[in-house]
């Protein structure tokens, strides 16, 4: 079976336009659904974060109302508790693409704070794209693609991509408070952005790049990634 690198935010907050620190991290479902699917298929997971810090789960994502019910929230908490990889991440700067069969980026608002401008992540993404390594990125995590720009140009320009939409950010009341929005910046970078219904699963596959729109897309995205690995 394969070895898959989960590149995760190390941020515990997201700085808003007025300087307020909005508590965040990674979104639970975007870790737990792919983790369960990939480990269930026998794959090994390695977690990497900027600086090797232990990633923070966004506590909002574990509220029953956000997770899809109390039982679902409890199941997600159980997966997180059982995932020892979360407690021993490697430093992203030391991660070598050639050691992995695929790369996956879960979202949450955390990547809006760190991964969007992380040079180590940008180099890894650029290398994965060029090597044809399966690369899956969901929700807010596609903002990490912004770090691949050199002189304003990204190798991801022209790729079909989805991500957390402006409409979804507005629906949670944070669009007007954000310094910038994921959809806007990705469009400005030159990707071919597409979207599905708000909050409904929606994924896009373009060559070795797999992207998902929102938390509900994480499970379907993982299944597509598994198909790509088979």
Image (spheres, rainbow, N blue to C red):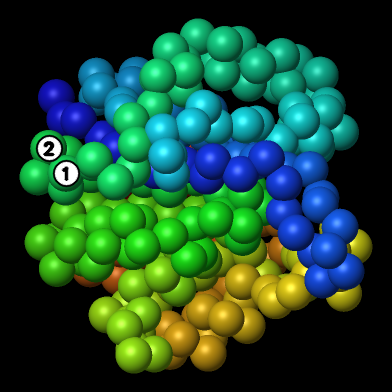
The quadrant where residue 171 appears? bottom right
Residue found 53% across the figure and 90% down from its top:
188
Disc 1 secondary structure class: loop
User: Alpha-carbon distance for marks 1 and 2?
Assistant: 6 Å
Residue found 56% across the figure and 18% down from its top:
80
Which x, y percent locates residue 2? Answer: 16, 30
Disc 2 secondary structure class: helix
Which x, y percent locates residue 217? Answer: 55, 50
Residue found 24% across the figure and 24% down from its top:
43
Report the front residue among 194 and 22: 22
Residue 170, numbered label: none
Report the front residue among 181 and 33: 181
- Which residue is under mark 1? 96
Which x, y percent locates residue 164? Answer: 63, 64
Picture layout, residue 82 above or below residue 193 = above
Residues under numbered marks 1 and 2 in contact, where contact means CB atoms less than 8 Å apart:
yes
Does residue 62 appear in this view? yes
Residue 99, numbered label: 2
């Amino acid at each position: 079976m394969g070895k898959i690198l989960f590149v995760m935010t190390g941020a515990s907050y997201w700085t808003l336009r007025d300087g307020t620190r909005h508590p965040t991290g990674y979104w639970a479902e975007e870790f737990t659904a792919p983790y369960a699917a990939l480990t269930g298929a026998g794959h090994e997971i390695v977690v990497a974060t900027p600086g090797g810090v232990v990633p923070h789960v966004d506590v909002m994502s574990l509220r029953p109302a956000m997770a899809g019910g109390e039982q679902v929230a409890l199941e997600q908490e159980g997966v997180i508790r059982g995932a020892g990889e979360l407690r021993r991440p490697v430093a992203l700067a030391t991660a070598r693409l050639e050691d992995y069969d695929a790369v996956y980026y879960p979202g949450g608002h955390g990547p809006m704070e760190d991964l969007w401008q992380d040079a180590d992540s940008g180099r890894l993404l650029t290398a994965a794209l060029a090597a044809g390594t399966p690369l899956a990125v969901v929700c807010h995590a596609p903002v990490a693609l912004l770090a691949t720009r050199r002189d304003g140009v990204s190798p991801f320009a022209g790729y079909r991509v989805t991500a957390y939409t402006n409409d979804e950010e507005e629906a949670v009341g944070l669009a007007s408070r954000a310094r910038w929005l994921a959809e806007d910046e990705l469009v400005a970078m030159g990707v071919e952005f597409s979207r599905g219904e708000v909050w409904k699963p929606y994924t896009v596959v373009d060559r070795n790049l797999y992207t998902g729109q929102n938390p509900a897309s994480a499970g379907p995205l993982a299944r597509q990634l598994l198909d790509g690995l088979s």
